[in-house]
Amino acid sequence: MNSGNVYQCPTCERSFETRAQLVGHVNSGNTACEWGQSDDEASLTDPTYYLSRELSKLAFNRRVLQEAIDETNPLLERVKFLAIFTENMDEFFMKRVGGLKQQRAASVTERTPDGRQPTEHWEEVLTEAQPMLERQVECYRNGLGDALEDAGIEIRPYDDLSADEQKEVDTYFESSILPTLTPLTIDSAKPFPHISNLSLSLGVLTKHTGDTEATFSRIKMPKNRPRFVQIGDGTRYILLEELVRANLDRIFPNAEILEDAAFRVTRNAEVRRNEEIAEDLLQLAEEVIEQRRFATVVRLEVEAGMSDQMLEPLLENLDVGPSEVFRLQGPLDFSDFTTLTGLDRPELKLPDWTPQPHPRLDTGYEATDRSIFEEIRSDDILVHHPYHSFTDTVQRFLDEAATDPDVLAIKAAIYRTASDSAVIQRLIDAAENGKQVAVMVELKARFDEENNLEWAQRLEEEGIHVAYGTIGYKTHTKTALVVREEEDGVELYSHIGTGNYHSETAKRYEDLGLFTANRRIGQDLVQLFNYFTGNSEHEQYSELLIAPGNMREHFVDHIRREAEHARAGGPAKITAKMNRLEDPEIVEELYRASQAGVEIDLVVRDICRLRPGLDGVSENINVVSIVNRFLEHSRIFYFRNGGDEQFYIGSADWMQRNLDNRVEAVVPIHDAQLQERLRHILELNLTDNTKAWELHPDGSYTQRQPSEDVARNAQAQLTEEARDHSR
């Protein structure tokens, strides 16, 4: 517990000056206080048992950055992760730091399960983030940049170019860049300009003859111009901001350039969503998009050499404090470095991966050259992306449904989809072919509101029944239902997945999906879609675990049942794979199961509040995290259940928002062969010793090393298996 600035052990009541000292005391297994020896001696809800959600997310981002630092990775794979780290940190500041800043402004003092108030969290994450961003720059400036140059991919400063090269890029600047620039100067007639979110700018101080003070101007780097300006015909580049910097005399003629420095602004994405006041969810989505443009600034990145004179107007007008300023050597914003990963340099990349046909859905084989509905009706099908092709599985399911004369209706829940979505087009085609089509489009999918709004309006124009989410909840399910008339009556064909109906992310995200003709599952989906379109909430489902509804209750019951088996002296085991483990109630249940003797293995990609390995509390729990070429995104849940094993997959993490505040769907896997496949996937993840990281009780992670053992890479093994099975 924390009283003022004193942290106290809830068992022995010894006091510590810092949280780190208390955690060290807890992790030492100190017998003097018999920490956590029984439920009666220490409350499992005590904050010291819970890791910070925000700091855990930063720990994940460190693991991502390590992929850029790791010299055993191919060069352009390292560049990819350098860019991903920027994107992850941008999102972290927009969402998590933005939310903390909002809470501070509202004087919120409520503590999170780890015992921190918003102000404490805000201060800690800013302190933790600074060296991480500095390490990213160091990775590029003292290693990765040199390695690129050695490989013939040069990013040069202007002064290093030959006279002919300078003339070439200056000519390009004059013709293609200068006309797009709009320098905005602050003076008595011109207010400080709006600085858009994540925009890269140059700040410039100038002085004209007779001026007594310098004038501040801002030049925004145009997003519709390449960040990497090519020099000649090869792979030599100059960054756009460096080219603009070299030509400031053309932008400010007859002025003395006193200083220039790049800066970048990050704004809060946690804007107000008042669903009770908004006339409808369409209006709400439009308001969110507009509010986000002008939201509070939560981070200001500036070049390390920026003077206080230039920084002052930024601090004053952007309303940020010194702790929110990140001075970095630069370049700022590595997200555009993904451009380099498109170079035709296969020797600098991992071997190309093409998602393979699913063995049962490969129409090239005579034995399976029949409709997808015949295949599904014969046996359930488990698809695993990106090892299996999205186009040949999920897209084919919708393609055939849109044109099959026996299909009566198609229903789908869309959380995110591609901007040129073939999924949406098939639904439109189905409506044009006389099918009844209903689509749930979630307008509150963060950062995709505008894209989803456009698709929803397009669908409505085609006469399709569209539901815009549900008041109070985000709809996060990944579900589709096809209703088909057949000789023996109307059949229901279901798809329940862990990933979005997004053809592009399906090539980069690891996800699972079940195709089934199980009528009980289909009828559950009928109820779920009726809830979407008719607001007819159901509490009972035959097969599916649905949130809000029966999901939390069932997961808690399953965990407690394993604990009962362990107390009775029988074998008990829980294995789960997810993106995040955050829900305090689930963590507490896992602690109690561990105390009962349940063996618990968790694969948690990023946020994890649970502390594994605490004596008397969680010594039976192991947690690993996989960071590899594909984003681990599937959710799998396994319970031994006294030998009557149960497997589930679905859209929900063990987070409070997923279990209570989102509409989620998790489906049981009954087929024995598919259960074995899920067991195999879990075992590969748990035994990975090249891309797996082990979580320690203090929240730190250690990357596994093969040492003398055989190197095991779960994703590499799965790609090889998919290739073998498709031959």
Image (cartoon, rainbow, N blue to C red):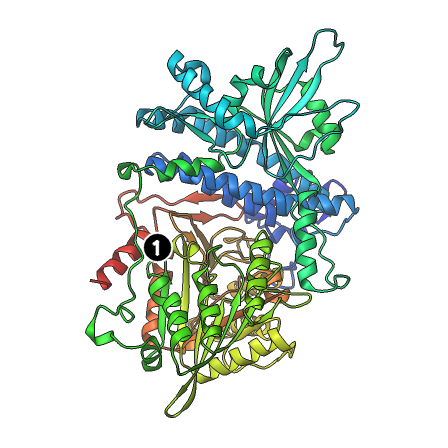
- For image coordinates 52% across by 73% down, the residue present is 558
Image coordinates for residue 138, horizontal then vertical, percent: 47, 27
Q: Is residue 530 above or below residue 703?
A: below
Between 260 and 248, the residue placed more toward the observer is: 248
Classify residue 247 as left or right of residue 157. Answer: right
Which quadrant of the figure has residue 268?
top right
- Whether residue 8 is visible to the viewer of this picture, yes or no, is no
Q: Is residue 8 above or below residue 375?
A: above
Residue in front for this viewpoint, 288 or 230:
230
Q: Is residue 6 left or right of residue 603?
A: right
The residue at which mark 1 appears reads as 687
Name which residue lies at 54% across and 33% down.
133
- Quarter of the image where one finds residue 393: bottom left
Callout 1 secondary element: helix
Q: Residue furthest top?
A: 210
Residue 584 % position (x, y): 62, 60
Image spot of residue 552 (x, y percent): 59, 70
* Residue 123 appears in the picture as rendered: yes
Give the vertical position of 509 relative to 127 (above or below): below
Count of labels shown? 1
Looking at the image, is 495 positioned above or below residue 221? Answer: below
User: Residue 267 versus residue 146: which sits nearer the camera?
Assistant: 267
Q: Quadrant of the C terminus?
A: bottom left
- Name the residue rendered at 60%, 53% in the picture: 49
Judge the density around disc 1: few (<14), some (14-19), many (≥20) Cα neighbours within 10 Å: some
The percent coordinates of residue 63 (x first, y second) are 46, 42
Amino acid type indicated by mark 1: Thr
